[in-house]
Amino acid sequence: MKDAIEKCDEINVLFKPFTKNEWIFSNTKAYKIFKHMSDEEKKIFNFDVTRIKWRMFVMNHAYGIKRFILKEEAE
């Protein structure tokens, strides 16, 4: 039981910034910039925010938390 409590305390410290704050991401400005770029600029600065694969992003994030922070086996 002591190990479980210590692990919970450690997780609490590590995740405090994410659980105590509100995180809002906006791509409005990036989208406006990309929309006004030439085709050549779009090739050079490939940052089309509409092409982000959010499901894969979240899955990779969860994998990293499980493997590197919680030190558990991750699939």
Image (tube, rainbow, N blue to C red):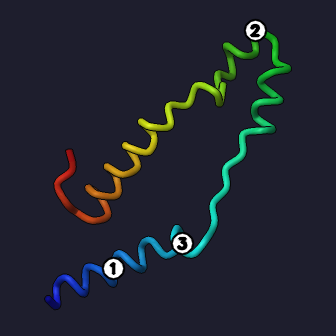
Q: Which residue is mark 3?
A: 17
Q: Residue 35 is drawn in which quadrant?
A: top right
Identify the residue at image location x=25%, y=79%.
7
Tell me which label, 1 or 3, sits earlier in the chain. Answer: 1
Q: Closer to us: mark 2 or mark 3?
A: 3
Is disc 2 in contact with disc 3, using a CB cutoff of under 8 Å? Answer: no
Amino acid tagged 1: Glu
- Answer above or below: position of 56 versus 62: above
Residue 17 percent coordinates (x, y): 54, 72
Rendered residue at 50%/31% (across/down): 53
* Along the viewing direction, whichever of 37 and 18 lies nearer the viewer: 18
Q: Are marks 1 and 3 in contact (CB under 8 Å)?
A: no
Relative to residue 23, is residue 4 depicted above or below? below
Front in this rendered view, residue 54 or 48? 54
Q: CA distance from mark 2 to mark 3?
A: 39 Å
What residue appears at the point 72 percent right and 46 percent down from the top-left corner?
Answer: 26
Counting from the top left corner in percent of width and height, residue 48 is at: 66, 25
Q: Badge 2 is on which residue?
A: 39
In space, the residues marked 2 and 1 are separated at their CA atoms by: 48 Å
What residue is rendered at 81% in x and 38% in y? 29
The crowding category of the residue bearing disc 1, from other C-alpha atoms within 10 Å (few below 14, some 14 to 19, many at least 20), is: few
Which quadrant of the figure contains the C terminus? top left
Seen in the picture, residue 31 relative to 6 is either above or below; the reply is: above
Q: Earlier in the sequence, mark 2 or mark 1?
A: 1
Tell me the kind of residue under disc 2.
Answer: Asp
What secondary structure is marked by label 3?
A: helix
**For the residues marked 1 and 3, what is the alpha-carbon distance in whole angstroms?**
13 Å
Location of the N terminus (image quadrant)? bottom left
Disc 2 or 3, which lies upstream in sequence?
A: 3
Where on the picture, by quarter, is residue 36? top right
**What residue is disc 1 on?**
10
Q: Residues within 10 Å of mark 3 (few under 14, many from 20)?
A: few
